[in-house]
Image: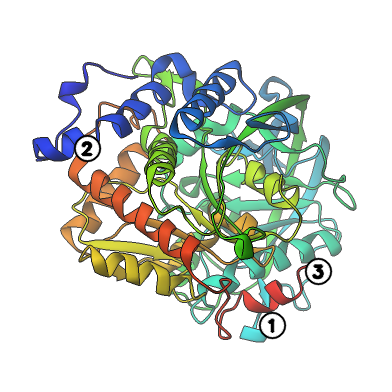
């Protein structure tokens, strides 16, 4: 729950000058993360109010409207919610039925599940990935037809580079579908950003897909996420224990694949609806006629998680750092660059996207339906939860090794004496986890920027603690400590990076060694 006044919020040893520079930035966060915005759920009246606030801020900054409806690009969604009162899960073994309590033991992932009932045997498929080019195929000679496929979620074996992990998981999902499986049981990663208790709270929130998307090919499978504390139940009577398999996965070792005794009996009931939510789009025109057809697009997501079950009297996911902070940076950068002379050479689009929390859907829609001529987007710079909780000594750049945008970042950071670093946690695959991926997968070079840290440093520990205590929780509110000096320095550096990219003489390009370049070359 949002706690005021602001004076209690401003400090982690931030000097008064930094506080003054950050007053407007923090003011946007106070508005967008206030309780009255009720967590800015995609499609909600409060998200619309937040979008209107951003549109007014873009207008004051000096941008031009660049949506399909003034400042707005409406996006239509199909909405699904689990009907837990009509849904059931149970393990059946040796004639005994062991119910799985929804929320405590497991959840039904409504984004991936169909309705109806399943009674199916179980098979363990390791990581659930397929990457034969790296010597991994968890589905080679594995019969999944009619079975619930059990996999360890959120981990990958050693030897598969970060950019290839998402593709390997997608190929594994395709193999499950093509193999005629009944569904998937993903065992939640106990070492991920969220504890199970916080993940389970989100199970009743609506899940969405773009209404413009075609229906999934083939049957929609049952998708279950299992609490790792309950996972030994699945492996009882098998030659392997879950604890031993998890230890292997944590070390990146190969995993065995085998049939599990017992069956999953399930009934999934969903409630379906539709919704409309807006991307907010402003344009800063360029000054160079030769570059007027090359647009740099800046993105930050406006939506968050809305309202959930009360915890200690609070039910609002305010989303101050995730991602009111990124929207505030987008707005302040618009004002900074609109006032800057000489004007930037390339046109710059400022896009506050919706539905990031639903699977990058707002950015996916914009990238697939840009409000400028097709093919005119040449680069994306995304800002999502940049976490100004440490001093800005280093700038963490997701995608640093992938394109020559890194040269622009290094030039800008060098002027401000900030070290540029690659992601110190490559196992988290941060480059493909936020809205920049909507552009990457269409062949558009992209970066995302955050306040950086080195691994196993006090700064890293502070980030880990923030994730454990606040990420996707009700504690991500304006009452948390923020380093305003770091925020001011980040915003200044962000504007310099944008300037470098917008003024560079050549179109941004992937490095020849980038794992994303072949996909880029195959994109029209």
User: Considering the image in quadrants, where does the N terminus appear?
Assistant: top left
Q: Earlier in the sequence, mark 1 or mark 2?
A: 2
Badge 1: how crowded within 10 Å, few (<14), some, or many (20+)? few
The residue under label 1 is 132
**Which residue is depicted at the point 24% across and 16% down?**
4
Badge 3: how crowded within 10 Å, few (<14), some, or many (20+)? some
Q: Secondary structure at mark 2?
A: helix
Query: Is 474 drawn above or below residue 516 in the view shown?
Result: above
Residue at mark 3 to residue at mark 2: CA–CA distance = 61 Å
Left of 269 or right of it: where is 388? left
Q: Secondary structure at mark 1?
A: helix
Q: Position of residue 521 (x, y in %)?
A: 72, 76
Question: Which sits in the foreground, 40 or 145?
Answer: 40
Q: Quadrant of residue 476?
A: top left
Marker disc for residue 143: 3
Residue at mark 3 to residue at mark 1: CA–CA distance = 18 Å
Q: Nearer the viewer, mark 3 or mark 1?
A: 1
The residue under label 2 is 21
**Which residue is depicted at the point 37% across and 52% down?**
495
The answer to whether marks 1 and 2 mark residues whose Cβ atoms lie closer than 8 Å is: no
């Amino acid at each position: 729950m949002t706690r005021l006044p602001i004076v209690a919020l401003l400090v982690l040893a931030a000097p008064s000058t930094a506080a003054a520079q950050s007053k407007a930035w923090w003011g946007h966060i106070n508005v967008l993360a206030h309780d009255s915005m009720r967590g800015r759920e995609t499609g909600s009246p409060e998200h619309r109010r937040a979008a209107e606030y951003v549109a007014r801020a873009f207008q004051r900054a000096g941008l031009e409207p660049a949506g399909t409806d003034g400042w707005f690009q409406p996006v239509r969604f199909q909405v699904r919610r689990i009907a837990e009162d009509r849904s059931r899960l149970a393990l059946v073994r040796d004639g005994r039925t062991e119910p799985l309590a929804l929320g405590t033991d497991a959840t039904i992932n409504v984004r991936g599940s169909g309705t109806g009932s399943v009674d199916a045997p179980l098979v363990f498929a390791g990581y659930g990935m397929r990457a034969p080019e790296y010597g991994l195929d968890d589905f080679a000679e594995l019969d999944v037809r009619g079975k619930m496929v059990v996999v360890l979620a959120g981990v990958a074996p050693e030897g598969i580079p970060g950019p290839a992990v998402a593709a390997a998981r997608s190929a594994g999902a395709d193999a499950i579908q093509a193999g005629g499986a009944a569904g998937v049981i993903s065992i939640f990663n106990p070492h991920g950003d969220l504890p199970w208790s916080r993940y389970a709270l989100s199970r009743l929130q609506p899940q969405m897909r773009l209404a413009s998307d075609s229906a999934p090919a083939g049957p929609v499978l049952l998708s279950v996420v299992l609490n790792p504390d309950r996972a030994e139940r699945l492996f009882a009577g098998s030659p392997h224990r879950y604890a031993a398999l998890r230890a292997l996965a944590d070390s990146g070792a190969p995993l065995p694949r085998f049939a599990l005794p017992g069956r999953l009996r399930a009934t999934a009931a969903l409630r379906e609806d539709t919704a409309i939510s807006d991307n907010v789009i402003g344009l800063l025109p360029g000054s160079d006629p030769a570059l007027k057809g090359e647009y740099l697009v800046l993105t930050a997501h406006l939506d968050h998680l809305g309202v959930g079950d009360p915890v200690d009297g609070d039910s609002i996911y305010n989303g101050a750092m995730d991602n009111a902070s990124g929207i505030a940076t987008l707005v302040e950068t618009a004002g900074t660059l609109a006032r800057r002379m000489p004007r930037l050479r390339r046109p710059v689009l400022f896009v506050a996207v919706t539905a990031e929390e639903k699977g990058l859907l707002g950015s996916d829609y914009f990238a697939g339906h840009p409000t400028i001529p097709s093919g005119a987007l040449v680069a994306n710079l995304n800002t999502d939860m940049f976490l100004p909780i440490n001093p800005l000594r280093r700038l963490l750049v997701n995608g640093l090794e992938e394109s020559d945008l890194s040269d622009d970042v290094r030039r800008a950071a060098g002027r401000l004496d900030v070290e540029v670093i690659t992601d110190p946690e490559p196992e988290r695959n941060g480059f493909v986890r936020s809205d920049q991926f909507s552009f990457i997968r269409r062949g558009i070079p992209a970066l995302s920027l955050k306040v950086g840290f080195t691994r196993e440093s006090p700064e890293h520990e502070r980030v880990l603690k923030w994730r454990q205590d606040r990420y996707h929780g009700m504690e991500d509110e304006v009452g948390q400590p923020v380093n305003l000096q770091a925020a001011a320095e980040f915003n200044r550096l962000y504007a310099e990076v944008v300037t470098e990219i917008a003024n560079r003489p050549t179109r941004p390009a992937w490095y020849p060694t980038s794992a994303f370049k072949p996909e880029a070359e195959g994109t029209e």
